[in-house]
Image (cartoon, grey):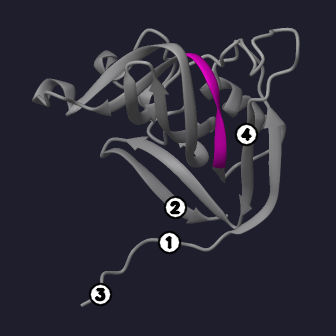
């Protein structure tokens, strides 16, 4: 018997292309863009460029009960990164405090590794593939990941080529919900 899954249709209203500048922390910049363009639910279709450093939550090399099977890593740059992901709203209906400290790092605010700062704030679940001289790593992008400061020609005096493409979606709301049962995606009609 086929399983019934929660789901609702939405419509792509518009695609926004927005340039980021050197030194901007990627995740808070994405939250700002969502507020500026009133993106309640959307898709980070693509973003790529040079990073000064990247913080990721990834599957642990040594899973244990006390780390929930994940590691928080900081990778020094210069790096190249490509990303995609989901955009929605952080949702804390039970007015719970942020997640325990071991699920957040020094650069994280609010609900940190969950990808949002508080109830009703923009949420971004961004997956990144990052490559540098020491190899390639994939994971969930965290705060504390600044855009690189050098352009293709080595100069810092020209605008960044770092751009994001975000599709604004209407008709459905993606909520990253943190309540007494845990942390999960809730998908509801708009």
Q: Earlier in the sequence, mark 2 or mark 1?
A: 1
Q: Earlier in the sequence, mark 3 or mark 2?
A: 3
Tell me if label 1 and label 4 are in contact, CB under 8 Å: no
- How far separated are the C-alphas under marks 1 and 4? 26 Å
Judge depth for marks 3 and 2 and give the one in front: 3
Relative to 185, residue 146 above or below: above
Q: Is residue 117 or residue 94 the one in the foreground?
A: 117
- How far separated are the C-alphas under marks 1 and 3? 15 Å
Q: Is residue 181 or residue 146 the one in the foreground?
A: 146
In percent of width and height, residue 95 lies at 47, 33
In percent of width and height, residue 110 lies at 50, 22
Numbered tag placed on residue 164 in the rendering = 4
In the rendered image, which residue does mark 3 sit on? 2
Judge depth for marks 1 and 4 and give the one in front: 4
Give the magenta part as a residue range: 45-52
Tell me if label 2 and label 1 are in contact, CB under 8 Å: yes
Instruction: Verify whether residue 111 appears in magenta.
Output: no
Q: Earlier in the sequence, mark 3 or mark 4?
A: 3
In the rendered image, which residue does mark 1 sit on? 7
């Amino acid at each position: 018997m086929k399983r019934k899954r929660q789901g609702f249709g939405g419509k792509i209203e518009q695609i926004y292309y927005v340039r980021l500048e050197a030194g901007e922390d990627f995740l808070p910049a994405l939250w700002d863009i969502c507020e500026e363009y009133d993106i309640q639910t959307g898709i980070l279709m693509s973003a790529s460029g040079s990073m000064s450093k990247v913080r990721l939550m990834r599957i642990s090399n040594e899973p244990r009960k006390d780390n929930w099977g994940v590691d928080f890593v900081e990778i020094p740059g210069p790096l190249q990164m490509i990303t995609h992901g989901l955009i929605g709203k952080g949702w804390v209906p039970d007015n719970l405090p942020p997640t325990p400290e071991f699920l957040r790092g020094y650069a994280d605010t609010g609900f940190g590794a969950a990808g949002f700062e508080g109830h009703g704030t923009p949420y971004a679940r961004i997956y990144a593939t990052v490559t540098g001289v020491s190899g390639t790593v994939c994971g969930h992008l965290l705060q504390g990941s600044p855009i690189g400061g050098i352009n293709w020609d080595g100069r810092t005096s020209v605008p960044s080529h770092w751009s994001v493409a975000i599709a604004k979606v209407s008709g459905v709301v993606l909520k990253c919900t943190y309540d007494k049962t845990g942390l999960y995606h809730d998908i509801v009609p708009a």
